[in-house]
Image: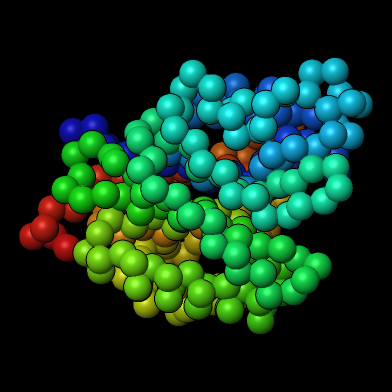
Amino acid sequence: MEPTLHIATHNIHKGFSQFNRRMVVHDLRERLRELDPDIVFLQEVQGLHIGHAERHEQWPEEPQHEFLAADVWQSAAYGRNVIYDHGHHGNAILSRFPIIAEHNQDVTHLRFERRGLLHCVVEAPKLDSPLHCVCVHLSLFGRSRLRQMDALAKRLEGLVPPDAPLIIAGDFNDWRNRAHDRLADRLGLVEVFAGVIGRPSRSYPSTLPMLRLDRIYTRGFSIERAEVHLGEPWARISDHAALSAHLMPLTPADR
C-alpha cells in the first residue's frame, strides 16, 4: 500500500544560497516539485522585500510562499513574524489539501528575535479527523526555546483533541535535544528519524551536516520512510538540508 501522506520541511534561507551568494528561489521551486510532498513546512519565507525586488531581475512578484505553491499546492498559509521597513518574513505551510483554519502564534521572548508558530488545520483524505500541522522556527537561545515549546504545548493541549493526528515540523535550533522531554513526551509525538534510527538526523549545515536542528514530529502515524536531502543540488539552495517523511495513518486499534 502506498503511504497516505508525504511531508517535507525546509528552512529556505529567504530564497538565497548559503552566505547569501545567489538568489535560488527558482531552483528551490523546482527541487520542491521534484520532491513532490503533499504538505510542505517552510521557514524563513520572504513575504516581501522591496530591496531584493529592485536588485534581482527575476525576483518573484508574489510572496515566496505563493510563488512556490503555484499550480501544485492548492492551499498556502503564511505567518508573518519579522517585520522591517523594507519587508517581512516568517513561516509557511503549503498543502495539496484544503487548509480550513490557520493561526500564527506569537512566541517572541526576546525583542530582537521575533518568532511565531504557524498552526494550520488541514482536511486530509483518508484521515478520520482533521490534521493539525504546526510549522516552527525556534529561538537560537536555549531559555527562549524552552518557553516557546511550552507555549506551543499549552496551545495544542487546549485546542487539539489528544487523539487527533498532529505534525510539528521545522527548524528547532535544538542542538541540546530538549524538544523530546519538553514537547514529544508531553504531546505523545514521535520524531520521524528517532523512530527509525533512534535520534534526530543531522541537517545543518547542508554541505556537511553536524547539528540536529531540523525535525519532523508526528502523532497518529507510522513512519514508512524518512530522508535527509543534502549534497547537490540541495546544498546550493540553503544552509539547511531538507527533511521528508512518508507516513501511514494509524488505525484506532493501533493508537
Left/right of residue 201 with respect to residue 28 in the rendered view: left
Q: Nearer the viewer, residue 139 or 130?
A: 130
Q: Nearer the viewer, residue 19 or 52?
A: 52
The correct choice, above or below, for 231 with respect to 85 in the image is above
Hey, which quadrant is residue 175 in on the image?
A: bottom right
Percent position of residue 1, x then y: 18, 33
Q: Residue at x 60, y 69 (%)?
A: 107
The correct choice, above or below, for 244 with respect to 75 in the image is below
Q: Residue at x 20, y 45 (%)?
A: 127
Asked whether residue 247 is in view, the answer is yes
Percent position of residue 232, x then y: 67, 31
The correct choice, above or below, for 13 with respect to 214 in the image is above
What coloring was used for the rendering?
rainbow
Left/right of residue 54 with respect to residue 212 in the rendered view: right
Left/right of residue 88 with respect to residue 90 in the rendered view: right
Percent position of residue 245, x then y: 41, 44
Percent position of residue 85, x then y: 86, 47
Q: Nearer the viewer, residue 85 or 161?
A: 85
Asked whether residue 232 is in view, the answer is no
Quarter containing the C terminus: bottom left
**How many numbered marks have been drawn onto this rendered protein structure?**
0
Hey, which quadrant is residue 19 in on the image?
A: top right
Hey, which quadrant is residue 92 in on the image?
A: top right
Q: Residue at x 44, y 33 (%)?
A: 75
> Can you name the residue that lies furthest to the left here?
253
The correct choice, above or below, for 6 with respect to 185 in the image is above
Q: Residue at x 85, y 42 (%)?
A: 86
